[in-house]
Amino acid sequence: MALIHRTTMTPTKLELLTGWLPKQRWYAGGAEAPDPVMAGGFRLDDPEGEVGIEFMIVADAAAREPVAYLVPMGYRGAPLEGVCGEALIGTAEHGVLGTRWIYDGVHDPVVMAQLRALLRGEATPQHQNKSDTPDPTVTVHGAGPDDGPDVRINRVLRPAETAQRPSGCVVAGWVWPDGTAARGVLAAFAPR
């Protein structure tokens, strides 16, 4: 199980995302700089214990209309070989672990492998801020080993009613800046 360290990270994850989010093609904000605030998320464990895996949900407090983004992240102790430069969100100094290379999880093979394992019912979502604590609020609907290998990640999150959830999907909640709670589909097996 992943160990959550109570320490500093410089720059913070939110500071890194402030500069990174507007550069993404799926960014839904306007010309003003985003003001990302923590809205939710969960972690998955790397079976090898090398890569930190977090699925962070941030809400843009600067947006005229509420916007929530899903940013899967892989935290590594060394650069990830063989990925494009845009895969790197940034580097940060961790108070315990030293320099961490933080990658957009869609480009990190360990992050994506564990997401597929979650969708197949072979991994357990972990609490975002507590060590060794499963997060029962993160649910998988219609999991099964026969689903396809391709996964679609919803970067811009929308609340979804139960009837709108596809089979083979991860559903989790987040909190809007005004305190209103929402739930929606974060990721799903892509249709064959």
Image (cartoon, grey):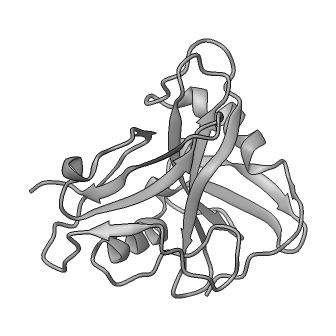
Left or right: 6 in relation to 4: right
Quadrant position of residue 58? top right
113 or 160: which is nearer to us? 160
Residue 136 % position (x, y) = 48, 75
Relative side of 118 to 142, left or right: right
Q: Residue at x 67, y 29 (%)?
A: 61
**Residue at figure coordinates x 73%, y 44% from the top left:** 14
**Picture layout, residue 57 above or below residue 113:** above
Residue sitting at 31 percent across and 80 percent down?
A: 121
Left or right placement of residue 183 versus residue 133 in this view: left
Residue furthest front in the image? 180
Name the image quarter holding the C terminus. Answer: bottom left
**Residue 102, x across and y down, in percent:** 66, 56
Front position in the image: 71 or 66: 66
Which quadrant of the rendered structure holds the N terminus? bottom right
Give the percent coordinates (x, y) of residue 175. Answer: 58, 45
Q: Residue extending furthest top?
A: 31
Residue 73 falls in image quadrant: bottom right
Look at 65% across and 33% down and name the residue there: 178
Residue placed most toward the observer, 98 or 35: 35
